[in-house]
Amino acid sequence: MYGSDGINDDSERTAFRKTEKKYKLYYDSNSKSKSSKKKKQPRPVDLSEVIDFKSILESFARNGDLPAGISKLQYQFDKPVFCLDNCPGFYFIPAALSMEEQCRWIKESLVSFPQPPNRTNHHAFYGAIHNLFNAAKSKQVLVKEDITPGEDNSNALDVNYHNHRWASSEELDSYVNGNDFKPISAPVLLRKLRWSTLGLQFDWSKRSYNVSLPHNKIPDALRKLAKKMAAPAMAVGEEFQPEAAIVNYFGSGDMLGGHLDDMEADWSKPIVSMSLGCKAIFLLGGKSRNDEPLAMFLRSGDIVLMSGEARERFHGVPRIFTDVENAEIVSLEKQFSNEDDIDYLEYIRTSRININIRQVF
Ligand code: SIN
């Protein structure tokens, strides 16, 4: 599902695929020329058909107006919850998270969520990696450590499983010699972080939850937030049980191809999906990839709920915007303007994070 062009099935001609291609980031071919000194320019995209819940919210707050096909859920909630009339089970809560909450979950997504026993996309290749964000901050390098049998290698913060450890760049030379593992810098690994999983761990190779994998419970504050946000999509008297979450990390040019989230037992329960960082386009399709999807903007702080019938619909993220006019993260940048937050600022101004929280059983 991931990558700079994450579609690998034979669906080139489906309506979903066509819409993905319409919005995906492409560069104008003549601006890529090596001889040209010009910065490569993204191909312009017509965004006129993209549903914009921020302006919908603003006009609703001004005069109660809503566009055809969109209504406000009659539900007592501290933010307006919008629904699409022809898509039962889909809910959009614009600006649901305060700036403080956004900053908190961005920090957690970078610092604590990728920590073992949570798995990340790096796990398959490197095993568990500890302290990636801090290692990236101090420009460390992942090297392979030769462990002599019987030697005490229990310095758990330093030594990762699979005998990798962080080294400073000054230390690097002594590790390179005679070692077939090519050292890799922590900033590169951070940029290549695509997902981490919280709570019950997902086994991507089997596309199923593997309850026997070591895991920690989803942190209480995130569970509490997810329960609150899920409430508009829950049956009366029921409470959402957050058991697993996937955190997706997007850099410029990354996309999440059209897919269904179908590994949970009870689809009547919502997936609670939080957007953080740069603005993105979300596609909500139908039950077949041949159904033409609707496109909508997702901004930092927005929450989407997909439950019931909506869970049978293909969806994906063909584009994130990292350019100044479209990313819309000026307010977030201000929050991270403190010197101590410079590394978060640098990351988030060209990235998007999505945390989607699920009830598995
Ligand atoms: C997903 O569909 O799994 C994530 C959607 C998003 O990134 O907003």
Image (cartoon, rainbow, N blue to C red):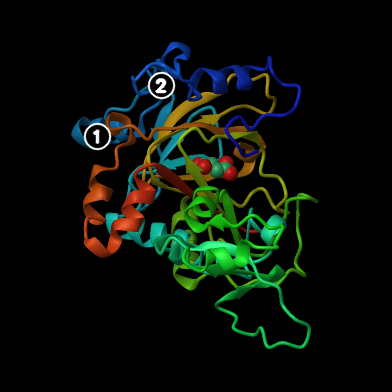
Image position of 65 (left or right of 281): left
Question: Furthest-top residue in view?
Answer: 30
Which numbered tag is attached to residue 90? Answer: none
Which residue sits at x=47%, y=51%? 232
Would you identify the image quadrant in which residue 70 lies? top left
Q: Is residue 114 visible?
A: no
Which numbered tag is attached to residue 42? Answer: 2
Mark 1 and mark 2 residues within 8 Å of each other at the beta carbon: no
Residue 329 coordinates in the image, percent (x, y): 29, 42
Closest to the observer, 80 or 111 = 111
Front label number (1 vs 2): 2
Q: Work out whether 292 lies above or below 198.
A: above
Which numbered tag is attached to residue 58? Answer: 1
Which residue sits at x=63%, y=27%? 286
Closest to the observer, 70 or 24 = 24
SS at mark 1?
helix
Closest to the observer, 37 or 320 = 37
Residue 44 coordinates in the image, percent (x, y): 39, 16
Image position of 63 (left or right of 170): left
Q: Work out whether 105 lies above or below 82.
A: below
SS at mark 2?
loop
